[in-house]
Image (cartoon, rainbow, N blue to C red):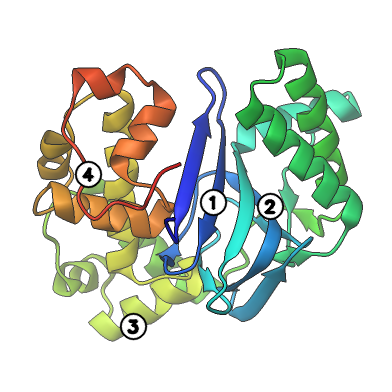
Amino acid sequence: MPLDWSTYWHSADRPLEAMHAHFERHVYHRHSHESYSFGVTESGAQSFTCRGGAYTSAAGMVMAFNPDDPHDGHATDELGFTYRMVHIGPDLVGDVLADRAGRPAGLPLFTDPVIEDPRIARNLHSLHAALLGGAPALRRDELLIATVATLTDHAAGTLSWPRTPGTARVADQARRLIHDTYLEDITADDLAAATGRTRYAVYRAFRAAYGMAPSDYQRQLRLRAARRLIARGRPLSEIAVRTGFADQAHLTRWFSRYYGITPGGYRLALAPDLAEINPDTDSDQVEQR
């Protein structure tokens, strides 16, 4: 039996995805998502760092990550952990909250990455099971509304990035350059020239503002571009070259470290017929089930 396995589900018309996985050996590289990410640990325990602190989510606990919240993760012990994760786009969260309030509502900010609330855990588990189990659309919508509502009750305020003015300017200038040139082989000297600061000052400001090194942020943008190309049905070997990776194996290794699933597994979740259109396979696969 495989030690590590994962299954992935993707909505065809909304920013909504879900993953069910068991990991013993897999280690998540530090990364973030464009969506809100909520997970419930079913068994075992996962340890991770987020927002400058170290946390553990054991069975029955809920993990709550804001959009662009940098975090990593690994099994706390050799027995591993099993968990269910739901990724919900900010626009979809905003729509649910606006419908609930009858007016536009601010996006919630979660300050504690681990929540101990059996009701939230049950709602999240039910939503996840409905998404992967093919429940009727009406039932999925009801569970989504209930889950977002109970989660929002634990939010500490509205979403924003608390940065000091000094580091914000330097970090934002560096971020804009990386966004504009993320497929190019830019250097620390390029970032220093763009911001008028030393290489170390840029690195420190960027880490303070975004929770990861500029190189990790660049790689994350490349992986997000790869996800978009996978959704368009492009061959994995072509995607690797177009997004700045050395080859398909290189893309697969980093994709798995960030998302817990291989590019081929993600493509199957988007549309099973894409596997027939592009039969190239992953190397160094995370076992799929």
Of residues 60 and 206, the one nearer the viewer is 60
Q: Which of the two discs, 1 and 4, labels the residue nearer the N terminus?
A: 1
| Camera-nearest label, 4 or 3 | 4
Q: Residue 168: x percent and y percent?
A: 48, 67
At x 11%, y 59%, the residue is 185
Q: Which of the two discs, 2 and 1, labels the residue nearer the N terminus?
A: 1
Identify the amino acid type marked 4.
Asp
Name the side, left or right, on which 64 lies relative to 214.
right
* Crowd rating for badge 3 (residues with CA inside 10 Å; few <14, some 14–19, many 20+): some
Q: Which of the two discs, 4 and 3, labels the residue nearer the N terminus?
A: 3
Residue placed under numbered mark 4 in the picture: 282
Up-down relation of residue 178 to residue 150 (above or below): below
Up-down relation of residue 70 to residue 263 (above or below): below
Q: Disc 4 vs disc 3: Cβ atoms closer than 8 Å?
A: no
Identify the amino acid type marked 1.
Ala
Q: Disc 2 vs disc 3: Cβ atoms closer than 8 Å?
A: no
Measured Cα–Cα span from mark 1 to mark 3: 39 Å
At x 39%, y 21%, the residue is 271
Residue placed under numbered mark 2 in the picture: 159
Q: Which mark is residue 286?
A: none
Q: Residue 209: x percent and y percent?
A: 49, 69
Identify the amino acid type marked 2.
Leu
Of residues 142 and 50, the one nearer the viewer is 142
Identify the amino acid type marked 3.
Ala
Q: Which of the two discs, 1 and 3, labels the residue nearer the N terminus?
A: 1
Name the side, left or right, on which 76 lies relative to 23.
right
* Crowd rating for badge 4 (residues with CA inside 10 Å; few <14, some 14–19, many 20+): some
Measured Cα–Cα span from mark 2 to mark 3: 27 Å
Q: Which mark is residue 201?
A: 3
Q: Residue placed farthest to the front in the image?
A: 1
